[in-house]
Image (cartoon, coloured by chain):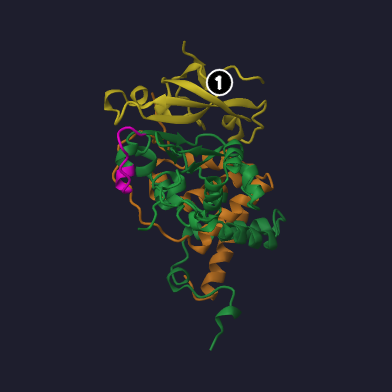
Amino acid sequence: MSHPHDDPHPHQPDIEDAPLGYHETLTEALLALLRDKGVFSADELRRTLEEIDSRSPADGARLVARSWIDPAFRERLLHDVNAAARELGIDAGGIPIRAVADTEQVHNVIVCTLCSCYPRLLLGAAPDWYKSRAYRSRVVREPRAVLREFGLELPDEVQVVVHDATAELRYLVLPCRPAGTEGWDEPALAALVTRDCMIGTAMPIVPG
Amino acid sequence: MSPRFRPGDAVRVRAWDPPGHVRTPFYTRGRRGVVLAVAAVHPNPEELAYGRSGLPAQPVYRVAFSQAELWGEAAERTSDRTVADLQERWLEPAP
Amino acid sequence: MNRRHHDMGGLAAGPVERAEHAHAPWEKKVDALLRLLLAKRVMTLDELRRGIEEIGPDAYDRLGYFERWITSIGNILLEKGIVTVAELGEAMASVRRAAAAAGRR
């Protein structure tokens, strides 16, 4: 009987029994060639894969929660997300990230209509829908209809602002702190902040 | 290179459609917007895309468009806005 | 005015399909490969994007997200002379041999 922790690559029947596809073959071939040529080492590849796996929306959620309980931090976050993230020990990378703050009057939502730019170092990998033709095409033209599909119905008096990430800048939505969370600590608040809250397709909800 | 435009300036996006790698969305071209801020000063992506340096770096602006300006009568709500990050050479003054 | 295929903001499209898939191991490797090539300044993000935009409308719609990426990365590396067509041909054959030996086709 095998011990699960002995095997660094647990068998994944759905993936590993699938036929070897053309693009997977190309990927493995390029990796092998570039390693042989010394462009990067096997160790660098392994560490980069670990780095990718280590990122999740929990990092972004910590920033949002801290901004709700610490007004000075919020100011610093709005001024420079990458620097504010460093304060919490989060490496947000070299591409500048800008926080766009919701208010009672304004709801922000982010998209990249030209490709799929996304604040990956704070939110992890982008969801498939963020990269889809439907989202990229429609959200700039009919944001309210798209948000309604996500279950978000915005009142008439709220202005929707769509941010199209067309340059080397990434956007992070800073949602409003929901009512009924007075006195909550940072981890409890962070648990309310989902990935979609920081894209702008959801709002934090207090379980009731 | 010091920025040509300042926050509050009205600008129009050039109605160009060259081939090649471009970071100015089609839906903004020919449209009038307002500069919110200088977002960054960046090497030119239209050059970087072909392996060149893209230098000198040029200003990139956050430009806000009303949905009415972008989509006209078809706008879902005219008072909503879209903001895109656009490079200086794609913008001209629109007083 | 000519609109390019990837430049889709404002076009009509169907509902946003919200099902999500976990990335396959090879898709994560594409992601890692790009990060390494950017960090080593072998290529730029703009070159990646240009390469994706040049695969043509049919392939753009037919290929998966990371399939588009690796297609672009392969072409850019060929263009730059970092790898040659023959090297890639042999390396791909070698990957297939190893997979077959491991019982995978």
Q: Residue furthest right?
A: A38
Residue A27 visible in this rendered orientation of the protein: no
Chain with colour green in the figure: A
Residue name at image x 59 percent, y 42 percent: A81
Residue A139 versus residue C92 in the image, above or below: above
Chain designation of label 1: B
Residue nearer the viewer, A79 or A123: A79
Say what amino acid the circle numbered 1 marks: Arg
Most extreme residue toward the front is A183
Disc 1 crowd, CA 10 A, few/some/many (<14, 14-19, 20+): few
Residue drawn at x 61%, y 58% is A51
Residue at 44% of width from left, 21% of height from top?
B33
Q: Is residue A150 magenta?
A: yes
Q: Name the residue at 48% across, 58% down.
A: A22
Q: Give the quarter of the figure containing the N terminus of chain B.
A: top right
Q: Which region shows up in magenta?
A: A147-158
Chain B shown in which color? yellow
For chain C, what colour was chosen? orange
Q: Position of residue A48 (x, y in %)?
A: 63, 58
Q: State the image coordinates of residue A90 (x, y, percent, origin top left).
A: 63, 52
Please determine whether, in this image, residue C29 is positioned above or below residue B91.
below
Residue A83: within the magenta? no
